[in-house]
Image (cartoon, rainbow, N blue to C red):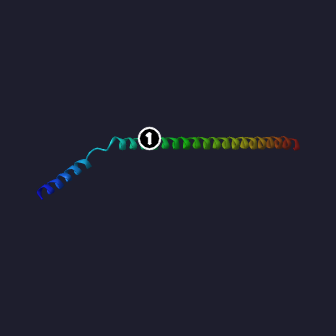
Amino acid sequence: MTKLIAILVSGLFVTAAFAQAPATPAVVKAEDKAAKVEAKADKKEAKVEAKADKKEAKVEAKADKKEAKADAKADKKEAKAEAKAEVKAPAAK
Protein backbone atom coordinates (compact mmCIF):
# COMPACT_ATOMS: atom_id res chain seq x y z
CA MET A 1 0.00 0.00 0.00
CA THR A 2 2.82 2.38 0.81
CA LYS A 3 4.40 1.67 -2.56
CA LEU A 4 1.11 2.59 -4.26
CA ILE A 5 0.88 5.83 -2.33
CA ALA A 6 4.54 6.59 -3.10
CA ILE A 7 3.92 6.02 -6.82
CA LEU A 8 0.84 8.26 -6.80
CA VAL A 9 2.66 11.04 -4.94
CA SER A 10 5.66 10.83 -7.26
CA GLY A 11 3.26 10.91 -10.21
CA LEU A 12 1.79 14.14 -8.87
CA PHE A 13 5.24 15.68 -8.55
CA VAL A 14 6.16 14.63 -12.07
CA THR A 15 2.99 16.09 -13.58
CA ALA A 16 3.48 19.31 -11.62
CA ALA A 17 7.04 19.61 -12.91
CA PHE A 18 5.92 18.84 -16.46
CA ALA A 19 3.16 21.45 -16.28
CA GLN A 20 5.76 24.10 -15.45
CA ALA A 21 8.06 23.15 -18.30
CA PRO A 22 8.47 25.79 -21.01
CA ALA A 23 6.34 25.57 -24.12
CA THR A 24 7.59 23.39 -26.90
CA PRO A 25 9.36 25.09 -29.81
CA ALA A 26 6.53 24.13 -32.17
CA VAL A 27 4.03 26.09 -30.10
CA VAL A 28 6.38 29.08 -29.94
CA LYS A 29 6.92 28.94 -33.70
CA ALA A 30 3.18 28.81 -34.32
CA GLU A 31 2.63 31.82 -32.07
CA ASP A 32 5.42 33.75 -33.82
CA LYS A 33 3.96 32.88 -37.21
CA ALA A 34 0.50 34.01 -36.11
CA ALA A 35 1.96 37.28 -34.83
CA LYS A 36 3.76 37.84 -38.13
CA VAL A 37 0.58 37.17 -40.12
CA GLU A 38 -1.35 39.56 -37.90
CA ALA A 39 1.30 42.26 -38.26
CA LYS A 40 1.31 41.80 -42.01
CA ALA A 41 -2.48 42.11 -42.14
CA ASP A 42 -2.36 45.27 -40.00
CA LYS A 43 0.31 46.76 -42.26
CA LYS A 44 -1.75 45.97 -45.35
CA GLU A 45 -4.87 47.48 -43.79
CA ALA A 46 -2.97 50.65 -42.85
CA LYS A 47 -1.65 50.89 -46.40
CA VAL A 48 -5.17 50.58 -47.85
CA GLU A 49 -6.46 53.24 -45.44
CA ALA A 50 -3.61 55.59 -46.35
CA LYS A 51 -4.32 55.08 -50.03
CA ALA A 52 -8.02 55.81 -49.51
CA ASP A 53 -7.21 58.94 -47.49
CA LYS A 54 -4.85 60.14 -50.21
CA LYS A 55 -7.49 59.55 -52.87
CA GLU A 56 -10.12 61.38 -50.82
CA ALA A 57 -7.78 64.34 -50.30
CA LYS A 58 -7.09 64.45 -54.02
CA VAL A 59 -10.83 64.52 -54.80
CA GLU A 60 -11.36 67.30 -52.24
CA ALA A 61 -8.50 69.34 -53.69
CA LYS A 62 -9.93 68.92 -57.17
CA ALA A 63 -13.37 70.05 -55.99
CA ASP A 64 -11.87 73.05 -54.18
CA LYS A 65 -9.92 74.02 -57.29
CA LYS A 66 -13.05 73.74 -59.42
CA GLU A 67 -15.02 75.85 -56.94
CA ALA A 68 -12.28 78.50 -56.82
CA LYS A 69 -12.21 78.62 -60.60
CA ALA A 70 -15.99 79.06 -60.72
CA ASP A 71 -15.81 81.84 -58.10
CA ALA A 72 -13.05 83.60 -60.04
CA LYS A 73 -15.09 83.36 -63.22
CA ALA A 74 -18.16 84.78 -61.46
CA ASP A 75 -16.10 87.61 -59.97
CA LYS A 76 -14.64 88.41 -63.37
CA LYS A 77 -18.10 88.45 -64.94
CA GLU A 78 -19.40 90.69 -62.14
CA ALA A 79 -16.45 93.08 -62.50
CA LYS A 80 -17.02 93.22 -66.25
CA ALA A 81 -20.70 94.02 -65.73
CA GLU A 82 -19.82 96.78 -63.24
CA ALA A 83 -17.27 98.26 -65.62
CA LYS A 84 -19.82 98.20 -68.40
CA ALA A 85 -22.38 99.88 -66.13
CA GLU A 86 -19.83 102.57 -65.18
CA VAL A 87 -19.12 103.25 -68.83
CA LYS A 88 -22.85 103.60 -69.56
CA ALA A 89 -23.52 105.76 -66.48
CA PRO A 90 -21.12 108.62 -67.40
CA ALA A 91 -22.27 108.45 -70.98
CA ALA A 92 -25.88 108.93 -69.87
CA LYS A 93 -25.03 112.18 -68.02
On screen, residue 65 versus residue 78, left or right, reads left
Amino acid at pointer 1: Lys
Q: Which quarter of the rendered picture does the N terminus lie within?
A: bottom left
As rendered, which of 67 and 29 lies closer to the eye? Answer: 29
Residue furthest toward the right? Answer: 92
On screen, residue 72 versus residue 51, left or right, reads right
How many other residues sit within 10 Å of disc 1, few (<14), some (14-19) or many (≥20)? Answer: few
- Helix, strand or loop at label 1? It is helix
On screen, residue 18 versus residue 27, left or right, reads left
As rendered, which of 3 and 49 lies closer to the eye? Answer: 3
Q: Residue at x 87, y 41 (%)?
A: 91
Q: Position of residue 72 (x, y in %)?
A: 72, 41
Q: Residue at x 34, y 40 (%)?
A: 25
As rendered, which of 42 and 78 lies closer to the eye? Answer: 42
Q: Position of residue 88 (x, y in %)?
A: 86, 43
On screen, residue 30 versus residue 84, left or right, reads left
Q: Residue at x 36, y 44 (%)?
A: 27
Q: Position of residue 42 (x, y in %)?
A: 48, 43
Judging by the rendered image, the residue that carries numbered circle 1 is 36
Q: Position of residue 14 (x, y in %)?
A: 21, 49
Q: Residue at x 46, y 44 (%)?
A: 38
